[in-house]
Amino acid sequence: MSLKRTQLYQYHREHGRLVEFAGFEMPVWFEGIIPEHNAVRDAVGVFDTSHMGRMGAEGSDAEKFLNYVVTNDVSALEPGRGLYTVMCNERGGVVDDLIVYKLTPERFFVVYNASNREKDFKWFQRHSEGFDVELRDVSDEVAMIAVQGPRALRTLERISSRPLGDVERFQIVDLRLSGFDAMAARTGYTGEDGFEVFILDATPEEPERALRVWSSLLEAGEEFGIKPCGLGARDSLRLEAGLCLYGNDIDEEINPLEARLRWVVKFKKPSDFIGREALLRIREEGVRRFRVGIMMEERGIPREGYEIWDGDQKIGVVTSGGYSPTLGVGIAMGYVPREYRKRGTPVRVKIRGRLARGKIVKFHPFYDETKYGWRRVEA
């Protein structure tokens, strides 16, 4: 089966190291993972995220429908606002995590994971019966670029038709970028300040608008040391921020309570939602395991699938792990029994047959938020 290509494939083919990801031919890096990672933490980087899923939902029941399929409270959104949420199966397992934007009272825009593009849209369609809502998969009609880092705002404003300093977190606005119709939402997957921009009417077959915006961003951010970034830096950045990767840290066998995503489950919202009864039962019985962060105290890089130990007892498995360029140590996330979730608890990770010392730490994010990330205190 041939791999799919995004609207920016032409640039990636000329400049990037390409790999297969979620059925797409995508750049894993351009210059290198660490310099791209550091560019986002220190200044600004741009990512092609057009492989992700995008859906429009429109109709008199659009809000009611979305509130039924996700755990967070869509009815609390004002127009122009978005929220992070998950949608669950009847057992409470996570079908996917996603962002829902309310454009108008009857128009919504939903962004979900690349690996779940077909699965999610079918899930939405299957559960839309009885609702007055029209669903459209617009993934190939709208290009998506993430502009991330402490200089993202200044970079994006240079090609924007409107100032963006007043745009708040998870707010979405209409604008023109390099003269083309687009939307911009102040969010991202790196832990840093930044925007995810959506270039309208840009398809893989007619990618000129997306390529023009990408090129304009690289030119606009040249003063700040902007770098095009690949999947490698995207993964290391999101890991440092303690953000979940679907298929690793969450899936249909993991529920949002044990994933430490309780804050996106609104049991008291005005409507029922898929998985509510199962999650109430899990809450009542008590969550038995929790997602935790681990920081290594000995040399060694924890990787997905590595075992977590306490003495001679295996207590869990790493779901995401790697080297943190910002902290200079190995970090990981994984699931352990509830009695191990307290910060400072010593654990060991089995790395190439050796049990290396680590400890449970704050992981959302791993770094000092006064120095890094969107909450940072600028000098």
Image (tube, rainbow, N blue to C red):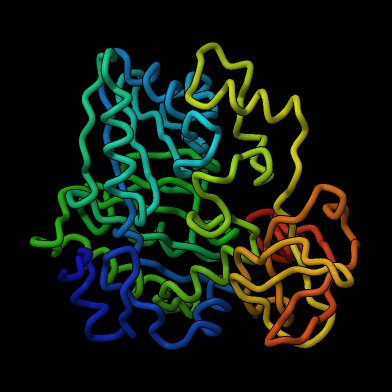
Splitting the image into 4 quarters, where does residue 50 fall? Answer: bottom left
Say which residue appears at 23% left-offset and 30% top-offset: 135
| Quadrant (top left, top right, bottom left, bottom right) of the C terminus | bottom right
Q: Position of residue 255 (x, y in %)?
A: 60, 40
Q: Where is residue 162 in the image (x, y as percent from the top left)?
A: 37, 47
- At a point 43% along the width and 78% down the height, the residue shown is 227
Q: What is the count of numbered marks?
A: 0
* Residue at the (77%, 88%) spot, across then down: 299
Left or right placement of residue 212 versus residue 46 in this view:
left
In the image, is 280 to the left or to the right of 275? right
Q: Which residue is drawn at 42% across and 35% down?
A: 100
Find residue 336 and report its image quarter. Answer: bottom right
Q: Nearer the viewer, residue 154 or 45?
A: 45
**Does 195 sit above or below residue 276?**
below
Say if 199 sits above or below 354 in the image: above
Query: Residue pushed farthest front?
Result: 312
Q: Where is residue 30 in the image (x, y as percent from the top left)?
A: 38, 84
Residue 268 in the image, given as x and y percentages of width and height? 63, 16
Say if 32 sits above or below 239 in the image: below
Which quadrant holds the N terminus? Answer: bottom left
Residue 73 or residue 48, whichever sits in front: 73
